[in-house]
Amino acid sequence: MSSANPSDKAQKDRLAELEEHMLYLVEVPDSIRYLESRLDEISEKTDTIDAVAGRVEGLPIQELLARVDTLETNITAESPARGAISVSRVKIPEPKPFCGARDAKALENYIFDLEQYFKATNTITEETKVTLATMHLSEDAKLWWRSRYVDIQEGRCTIDTWDTLKRELCSQFFPENVEILARRKLHDLRHIGEIREYMKQFAGLMLDIRDMSEKDKVFCFFEGLKPWARAKLYEQRVQELTSTYTAAERLFDLTSDSQDVRRHQSSSPGRNRNSRPSSPKAVGGDECPGKDRRSHSQTQRTHGQGRITGAHPSVPSVV
């Protein structure tokens, strides 16, 4: 009896376990049906997405995008060969030619104008930049380029980029010791005439002196001024060269206005202190007014004696 009890207990446990599995199997069909419904829903949504994508592909936007691509291709093809110069309604002025003068400012202005021209015309390729730059050379610079062009054709040198051409131009035409000469001129520069002319000369020298600090520039500008102008600018306590130029320009305007006022006052007859109203009895204008007064007094003294003397040189004496 005791040996049967463990066996019965094991069977009961096994039976309970089977019942639990049966309960789980009962729930499995419900889970399967739920998954099948989700799959059907996902399939329907996929079909909807495919249908929408098909309609989008048929919309006019695709045609418009294609036309835009075609227009861009045509514009690129119509641009000058390999220059990529865009067509613009704004007339861009041509840069001034460089004649080959050994002048640092002339060469730097030529290079600066060309680089601005490249930006304005959207010139991209190096070959086109070199061609345009050499087309704007004249006189000695043109002769120099012709000799260099022969060297290029014969393979003795290569100038195929804008940077290379700039280096060659500077090597040939940029004067030596530019900064030293500019510093010497700055040392001798003085404010003699108008302050605007002094500013122009000073600004030109500053283009050739590149390593001077802002404080030193302001100091040198002040040192060359006339004492009265220097005192006026010191009162404004300017610290930068740009503000110094502005203050000096205002000072020029003030002095010009004051000079105009003085000229106007000196030319006005109503404000001339030396002018005197002329007497209506005077004969002969401003000639010897003292003599006329003496003649008039003599006439009054002799009138009672029956004769007139000394009234005027052209009037005879009456006795």
Image: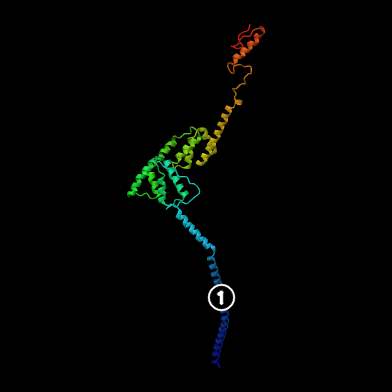
Element under disc 1: helix
| Count of numbered labels shown in the rendering | 1
Q: Position of residue 22 (x, y in %)?
A: 56, 84
Q: Can residue 117 be seen in this view?
A: yes
Quadrant location of residue 313?
top right
Query: Residue 15 or 59: which is nearer the viewer?
Result: 59
Q: Residue furthest bottom?
A: 1
Quadrant containing the N terminus is bottom right
**The one of 51 and 275 positioned closer to us in this rendering:** 51
Left-right relation of 170 to 312:
left
| Colour pattern of the rendering | rainbow
Measured as percent of width and height from the top left, residue 55 is found at: 54, 67
Residue 128 lies, in percent from the top left, at 41, 50
In the picture, the quarter occupied by the C terminus is: top right
Disc 1 residue type? Asp
User: Is 44 positioned to the left or the right of 300 in the image?
Assistant: left
**Picture coordinates of residue 196, whole percent (x, y):** 50, 36
Please name the residue that numbered disc 1 is placed on: 40
Seen at 44% across and 46% down, the residue is 114
Q: Which residue is drawn at 47% across and 56% down?
A: 74
The one of 224 and 194 positioned closer to us in this rendering = 194
In the image, taking residue 268 as reference, residue 226 lies left or right, namely left
Can residue 240 be seen at all in this image of the molecule? no
Image vertical order of residue 64 relative to residue 2, above or below: above
Q: In this view, does 198 lie above or below 70?
A: above
